[in-house]
Image (spheres, rainbow, N blue to C red):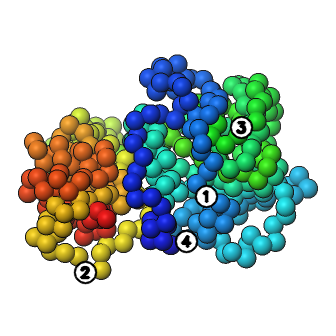
Amino acid sequence: MSRSSLRTAVSRSRPPFTTAPLGSMPAAAFLRSHWQRRARLFRRALPGFAGLHTRADLIALACRDDVESRLLVRARGRWTLAHGPFRHADFRGLPSRDWTLLVQGVNLVDERADALMRRFDFVPTARLDDLMVSYAAPGGGVGPHFDSYDVFLLQGLGRRRWRWGAQRDLTLVPDLPVKILANFAPARDEVLWPGDMLYLPPQAAHDGVAVDECTTYSIGVRAPLANEVVTAFLGFLADRVDLRGRYADPGITAPRSTARIAPDMIERYRALIAKLRVTPRDVEAFVGQWLTEPKPHVVYAPPGRPLASGPFARAAARSGVELDLATLALHDARAVYVNGERCAVRGAARSALAALADRRRLDAGACARLPSAALARVHDWYRHGWLHLGR
Ligand code: SIN
Ligand code: CO
């Protein structure tokens, strides 16, 4: 299904995100006692939920080249992994059992998936990664493994048997295309029904096997490696570094060994490098920009004939605006960040753009009151295809 037909196929109003999908448990209690610490099974976490996608919907998504997907088949004890984009024909000869299709980032292309993910807004947006949806034929699953981040596994269609535990031994079976625990020893064993949910902290061992054909909605958390953060920060600094001075060594004496890097030379380089100062503002800007950087495969569709700023302002004051599903928007005390761009604004403009980042839309009234500095930004984002006029 194309992005536009998915959009029109779904409800135009978003559900109110006032209650966390944690059954009867308040979000504050969950964050205090379980988040990052302990697994928890929520029966009827989302009563009435039975998935948003059929097998055909997920196959259609897996055939798109702007969506990441994987197909994992287990036959005669051997795992075979293939990466999308797929063709419909790839799904025709599959066995009736023991395979699963995993579709990543469904929230970026499907409004209902985006709305579901936003129900987890008791976790800061900047911590949420994406919504992955899996379809599994009976017996299908990805095998016993652990993830390095927290995950909410919400059962859609059908039933899935989950086994999990907090084992220390995380040794993996070598030389497989997937991560499989060599010594899986689960402490719990439960069958999840539609609307039930399992929360797992990082490193929890788990294995979900489809009892019937089933879909599972995984809300994954972003937990970057220290090395990844520092590498990205060094790249960010490289783009903005602007130091004065140059290597200089007046008064040196002739070396005894001409190819030698003498300690005083190293000291002069150290002094040059020590000119680099990392300020809290650098870190602040880096965090906002880096966390809103879209993934490489994400594409935006700018309007074919964009409205100029005056007509755009009038149209926004009539219909409001909403961020594109794939737009990442965050804010801090000084700026609003959209798709890797920092936008330093103050006062009412800042509050309006921060509200847009939080709610992902501004209604007509809010658009009519937008200060000109904010309106100029919103118009820019509209021209990039990062934001659309409301419907
Ligand atoms: C799945 O949906 O099959 C896998 C989810 C997970 O184990 O993290
Ligand atoms: Co997992």
**How much space separates mark 1 and mark 3, taking CA atoms?**
18 Å
Q: Secondary structure beneath disc 4?
A: loop
**How much space separates mark 3 and mark 2, taking CA atoms?**
49 Å
- The answer to whether one can see residue 13 in this image is yes
Q: In the picture, which quadrant includes the C terminus?
A: bottom left
Give the mark, 1 or 3, whose residue is nearer the N terminus.
Answer: 1
Instruction: Judge left or right: residue 309 versus residue 31.
Output: left
Q: Position of residue 163 (x, y in %)?
A: 76, 33
Circle 3 Cα neighbour tier, 10 Å, few/some/many (<14 / 14–19 / ≥20): many
Instruction: Judge left or right: residue 313 versus residue 286.
Output: left
Residue at x 69% of width, y 55% of height? 135
**Circle 2 residue:** 305
The amino acid type of the residue labelled 1 equals His
Which numbered mark, 2 or 1, is in the foreground of this view? 1
Q: Secondary structure beneath disc 3?
A: strand
Q: Is mark 4 within 8 Å of ligand 1?
A: no
Residue at x 18% of width, y 67% of height? 315
Residue at x 60% of width, y 42% of height? 48
**Which is more toward the observer, 201 or 157?**
157
Asked where in the image residue 381 lies, by quadrant, the reply is bottom left
**Circle 4 residue:** 1
The amino acid type of the residue labelled 3 equals Leu
